[in-house]
């Protein structure tokens, strides 16, 4: 079998671990020594797994590329199906189910959507073959690049990646509402510099259905539910968020204010203030958040950090309010939260409509007189 050599090495390492444990079981041993040896073995196992994955992904890409070149040399679609079917049968006999006809089609698709080997080389150290199989069937190239790069940066498991795709994370980011050119630029920056931007980090709406809130609840109930389910809330926010404080006291001129939630985002190197609102976003919410951000910038920001950002989570908002207040220029984002999710087709239609309208507004601003002509 193809993996026989790798599995043999792993078995040898596992036997070594058992030998160490058994040899010293009846003797008083130096726990530091035992701990050091176990650490060496476990780290070697991890490196072995990563190396095996790199080799495997490279092999699958090259197999797909070679078969694709053969198929493209003949104009008959039937010829391609016959070739792949025959190859699958022969390779499965020698190397196992990993090279079945179905697997070969995955490899061909892999080579088709990633024709540049340099991009594959950059991703293969963090993404497994299972990750790639989730990503390669996303038709939109920008969406595909988004998930691949976010998966690399935030080191998602395949289960998390699947959940993010199913929850339409890309469509919920501010990035998806930008022009195609700006999306390409931000993804290129992420790929080359590993630098996250607010457009990649913030979403709208946020899915808080896991909080289990009833039809009637207060802001304090919402905050308490978030803290009870903090791990899942952080997963929805993004893996680089770290919880800092709840009800952060801000004292100005002997008057106390309380910020609902305060987080820190490691990649952006910024504090992120979150205010929870039960109703629709109101214009006065901007002034409150601006006050909090200026105070955090003056008293809490540390050397080397960027200016704090604010996120106002509310039950609803109107696009014109948000646009006229020019919130993004003040470092403030407004997003809706959903404690109950609508049927997926309805949600999908709503998100796609929001993307369409946002891109139309961008196009109107770029072409003078277009907005007024509507």
Image (cartoon, rainbow, N blue to C red):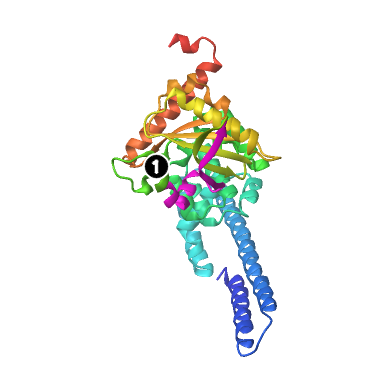
Residue 182 visible in the displayed image: yes
**118 is higher (above) or lower (below) than 29:** above
| Residue closest to the eye, 65 or 359 | 359
Query: 20 or 106: which is nearer to us?
Result: 20
Residue 234, above or below 180: below
Q: How many marks?
A: 1
Location of residue 45 in the rendering, given as x and y in whole percent from the top left corner: 62, 69
Residue at image point 50% right, 69% down: 93
Instruction: Say if residue 307 shows up in the picture.
Output: no
Q: Secondary structure at mark 1?
A: helix
Asked whether residue 177 is drawn in magenta, I would say no
**Which residues are drawn in magenta?**
226-252
Name of the residue lying farthest toward the left? 215
Residue visible at 45% across and 45% down in the picture: 165
Q: Position of residue 326 (x, y in %)?
A: 52, 22
Q: Position of residue 48 (x, y in %)?
A: 64, 66
Residue 348, x across and y down, in percent: 37, 36
Quadrant into which the N terminus falls: bottom right
Q: Is residue 165 above or below residue 86?
A: above
Residue identified by numbered label 1: 220
Q: Which residue shows up at 55% across the image and 29% down it?
A: 291
Q: Is residue 99 above or below residue 137?
A: below
């Amino acid at each position: 079998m193809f993996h026989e050599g790798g599995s043999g090495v792993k078995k040898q390492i596992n036997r070594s671990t058992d030998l160490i444990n058994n040899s010293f079981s009846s003797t008083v041993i130096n726990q530091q020594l035992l701990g050091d040896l176990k650490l060496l073995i476990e780290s070697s196992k991890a490196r072995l797994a990563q190396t095996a994955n790199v080799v495997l992904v490279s092999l699958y890409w090259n197999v797909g590329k070679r078969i694709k070149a053969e198929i493209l040399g003949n104009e008959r679609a039937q010829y391609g199906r016959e070739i792949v079917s025959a190859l699958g049968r022969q390779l499965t006999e020698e190397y196992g189910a990993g090279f079945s006809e179905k697997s070969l089609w995955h490899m061909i698709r892999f080579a088709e959507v990633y024709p540049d080997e340099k991009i594959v080389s950059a991703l293969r150290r963090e993404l497994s073959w299972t990750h790639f199989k989730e990503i390669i069937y996303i038709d939109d190239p920008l969406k595909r690049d988004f998930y691949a790069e976010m998966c690399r940066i935030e080191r998602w498991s395949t289960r998390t990646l699947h959940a993010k795709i199913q929850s339409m994370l890309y469509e919920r980011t501010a990035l998806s509402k930008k022009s195609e050119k700006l999306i390409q630029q931000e993804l290129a920056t992420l790929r080359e510099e590993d630098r996250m931007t607010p457009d990649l980090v913030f979403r709208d709406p946020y899915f808080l259905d896991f909080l289990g809130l009833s039809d009637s609840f207060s802001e304090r109930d919402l905050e308490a539910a978030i803290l009870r389910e903090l791990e899942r809330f952080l997963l929805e926010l993004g893996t680089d968020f770290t919880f800092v404080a709840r009800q952060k006291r801000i004292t100005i001129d002997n008057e106390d204010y309380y910020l609902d939630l305060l987080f820190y985002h490691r990649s952006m190197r910024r504090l992120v203030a979150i205010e929870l609102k039960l109703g629709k976003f109101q214009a006065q919410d901007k002034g409150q958040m601006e006050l909090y951000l200026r105070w955090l910038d003056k008293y809490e920001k540390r050397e080397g950090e960027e200016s704090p950002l604010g996120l106002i989570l509310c039950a609803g908002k109107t696009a014109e309010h948000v646009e006229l207040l020019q919130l993004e220029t003040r470092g403030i984002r407004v997003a809706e939260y959903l404690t109950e999710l609508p049927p997926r087709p309805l949600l999908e239609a709503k998100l796609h409509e929001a993307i369409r309208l946002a891109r139309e507004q961008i196009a109107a601003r770029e072409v003078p007189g277009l907005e007024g002509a509507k």
